[in-house]
Image (spheres, helix red, strand yellow):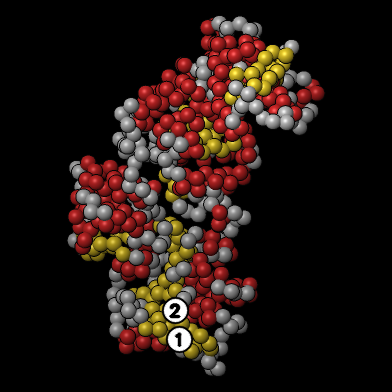
């Protein structure tokens, strides 16, 4: 094994120990890491362990003593007896009283300074963390007085929390001044073989003034394990998990897929997936099942349990609920077919974790875009509520991404997570509907790049949320309206918008030329929109063929929608009130009024029925002393009248 097999951060830390007197180790510091043995004839992988053991393996100089500290228990060393540790640590605490705790996991005794003795002369302050900083500073400035080794490396674990341990500002400043002086004075005294390593969550957990323009301190970022590290980890599994070693073989297809799919995961998470597999008695070739369980919390995959006739059922439900959009629904059916058969995204990579389907519905209002999304959820998942809708007009502000994906630590709402990420955690198998996407801030659209490409997103709390089992649908009215070009309108805070396309004659069927014109205008405007806001890469991830244009409903479609909605109204009234409504004599009038509303789509037809049918029905029923069993409708001028019948 050569040096390039070792993670970059380990090579960097090994190079700069003894060169830089202060090192801030940040990032993925709570994971397990590959531990290597270094020798003249090469490098050998020993296994994986925590940060302490990894640092010990990097400091392989017999002349160097490594001393660890954590804010709970205090100072400790590894792999020496209690007597030997007391011999090593005892001189450090000269002038301080300590609290000693015996441990039994790799190290033996932890010693925490609790108070100064009278003969100790040092800086003001009474915090034990100030005592720690004084001890570190004093020891680093003296090469040999406090251990029998020539050099000392102090490792401060959980250093992000040092400043949050009920310290007053003055105490915090004193503590970090001691640490800063320790690193600076060591270099001044040319004792640069002594080092202080602060292990933090992120670089700025240490006050800026400690490291700003300070050439003695270097930041080393611990990244999540790369593909090679994950493969090496799997290759060297031991114990009960050793049966999964084959997953590290690049020639083994399930292993190659697993290594690729776990991009971004930590080694501890890999181990947890393998432990799940072991607990469920899954063989290496079934590791995908354990991975799904880890991602989504369930072993069942609704996509694999779909009946063979699901496409026929989906087509039937779509045609029942959405009228006059045969071409659009044909495109939708193709995307659903790819999703059901697991063929989505294979043109990009065999290991693709992209969402099952991506669709962009564009077209006039009320023509069936949202209804199509609900019908897809109902047909695939058997529940219309599996369509999770987000009204993107609520995310106009640039900072609104925190509502969707969660606020970062320290900000209001951090504990609650994000609306989108929480919804996907709860229902990983769902249809995600982002309604009127053009109303969202363009900065929010950047967040969708990773979702559409990789099928995952890390929320504000650092949890990875997976979108690989969802269908993502955007809807938009782009191209249907434009700002009115008048001087008065330019001065308005919210400019008035006017239609760019209108139906030529509502009473006549649209010509094929007109319908094709509508399609071309809307699709062209969608492309221009993403180009103008500087997000062509988002359009590229959606895919040109996945832009589905819904056109104006035609005359016969308006009549069909009227029949469909009126039937549902009458069925609901009969179920709830026990009243059967006979509408035969008013259908021609309602059809005529529905056709006049077709410019507003199916929603316009529904509003017409509410105005022309439901309101008169409610008014009539309220005037009756006794509710009849049957109501017969008739034309009362240009309105619907009702007459009660007992049978």
| Residue reaching furthest to the front | 646
User: Badge 1, how many Cα within 10 Å: few under 14, some, many 20+?
Assistant: few
Q: Residue at x 45, y 71 (%)?
A: 156
Q: Nearer the viewer, residue 248 or 128?
A: 248
* Image location of residue 405, percent across then percent down: 53, 46
Q: Is residue 632 left or right of residue 428?
A: right
Residue sitting at x 37%, y 31%: 339
* Residue 477 visible to the viewer: no
Between disc 2 and disc 1, whose residue precedes? 2
Cα–Cα span, label 2 and label 1: 9 Å
In the picture of the structure, the residue carrying the numbered disc 2 is 74
Residue 18 drawn at (x, y percent): 39, 68
User: What is the crowding at mark 2: few (fewer than 14 residues within 10 Å), some, or many (at least 20)?
Assistant: many
In the figure, residue 76 lies in which quadrant?
A: bottom left
For mark 1, what is the residue?
99
Q: What residue is drawn where x is 52% and y is 44%?
A: 420
Q: How far from the left and from the top, in percent, is residue 323?
A: 51, 18
Horizontal and vertical percent position of residue 123: 58, 82
Q: Is 573 above or below relative to 267?
A: above
In what quadrant of the picture does the N terminus appear? Answer: bottom left
Q: Outermost residue toward the right?
A: 488
């Amino acid at each position: 094994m050569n040096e390039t097999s070792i993670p970059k951060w380990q090579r960097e830390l090994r190079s700069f120990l003894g060169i830089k007197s202060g090192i801030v180790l940040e990032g993925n510091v709570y994971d397990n890491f590959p531990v290597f043995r270094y020798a003249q004839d090469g490098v050998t992988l020993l296994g994986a362990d925590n940060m302490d053991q990894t640092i010990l393996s990097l400091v392989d100089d017999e002349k160097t003593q490594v001393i660890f500290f954590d804010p709970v228990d205090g100072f400790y060393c590894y792999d020496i007896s209690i007597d030997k540790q007391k011999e090593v640590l005892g001189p450090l605490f000269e002038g301080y009283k300590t609290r000693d705790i015996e441990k039994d996991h790799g190290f033996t005794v932890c010693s925490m300074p609790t108070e100064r003795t009278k003969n100790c002369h040092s800086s003001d302050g009474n915090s034990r963390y100030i005592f720690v900083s004084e001890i570190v500073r004093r020891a680093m400035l003296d090469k040999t007085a406090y251990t029998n080794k020539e050099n000392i490396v102090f490792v401060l674990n959980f250093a992000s929390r040092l400043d949050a341990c009920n310290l007053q500002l003055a105490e915090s400043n004193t503590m970090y001044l001691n640490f800063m002086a320790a690193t600076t004075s060591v270099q001044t005294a040319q004792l640069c073989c002594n080092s202080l390593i602060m292990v933090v969550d992120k670089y700025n957990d240490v006050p800026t003034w400690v490291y700003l323009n300070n050439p003695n301190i270097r930041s080393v970022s611990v990244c999540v394990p790369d593909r090679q590290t994950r493969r090496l980890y799997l290759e060297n599994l031991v114990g009960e998990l050793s049966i999964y070693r084959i997953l590290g073989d690049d020639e083994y297809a399930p292993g190659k897929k697993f290594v690729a799919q776990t991009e971004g995961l930590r080694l501890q998470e890999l181990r947890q997936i393998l432990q799940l597999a072991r607990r469920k008695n899954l063989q290496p070739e079934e590791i995908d099942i354990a991975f799904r369980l880890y991602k989504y919390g369930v072993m069942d995959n609704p996509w694999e349990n779909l009946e063979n006739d699901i496409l026929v059922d989906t087509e039937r439900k779509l045609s029942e609920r959405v009228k006059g959009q045969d071409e659009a629904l044909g495109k939708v059916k193709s995307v659903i077919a790819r999703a059901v058969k697991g063929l989505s995204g294979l043109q990009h990579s065999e290991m693709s974790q992209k969402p099952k389907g991506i669709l962009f519905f564009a077209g006039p209002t009320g023509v069936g875009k949202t209804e199509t999304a609900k019908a897809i959820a109902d047909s695939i998942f058997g529940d219309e509520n599996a369509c999770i809708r987000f009204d993107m007009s609520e995310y106009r502000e640039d900072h609104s991404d925190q509502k969707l994906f969660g606020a970062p630590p320290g900000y209001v709402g951090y504990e609650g997570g994000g609306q989108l990420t929480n919804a996907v955690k709860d229902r990983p198998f769902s249809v995600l509907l982002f309604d009127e996407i053009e109303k969202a801030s363009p900065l929010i659209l950047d967040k969708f790049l990773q979702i559409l490409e990789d099928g995952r997103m890390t929320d504000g709390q650092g949890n990875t949320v997976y979108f690989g089992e969802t269908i993502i649908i955007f809807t938009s009215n782009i191209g249907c309206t434009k700002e009115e070009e008048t001087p008065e309108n330019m001065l308005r805070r919210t400019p008035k918008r006017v239609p760019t396309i209108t139906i030529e004659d509502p009473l006549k069927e649209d010509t094929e030329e007109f319908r094709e014109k509508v399609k071309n205008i809307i699709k062209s405007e969608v492309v221009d929109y993403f180009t103008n806001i500087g997000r062509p890469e988002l359009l590229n991830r959606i895919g040109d063929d996945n832009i589905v244009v819904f056109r104006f409903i035609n005359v016969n479609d308006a009549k069909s929608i009227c029949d469909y909605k009126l039937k549902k109204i009458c069925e609901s009234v009969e179920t709830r009130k026990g009243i059967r409504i006979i509408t035969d004599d008013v259908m021609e009038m309602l059809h005529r009024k529905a056709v006049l509303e077709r410019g507003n789509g199916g929603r316009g037809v529904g509003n017409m029925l509410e105005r022309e049918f439901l309101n008169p029905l409610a008014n009539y029923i309220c005037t009756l002393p006794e509710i009849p069993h049957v109501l017969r409708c008739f034309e009362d001028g240009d309105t619907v009248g009702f007459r009660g019948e007992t049978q």
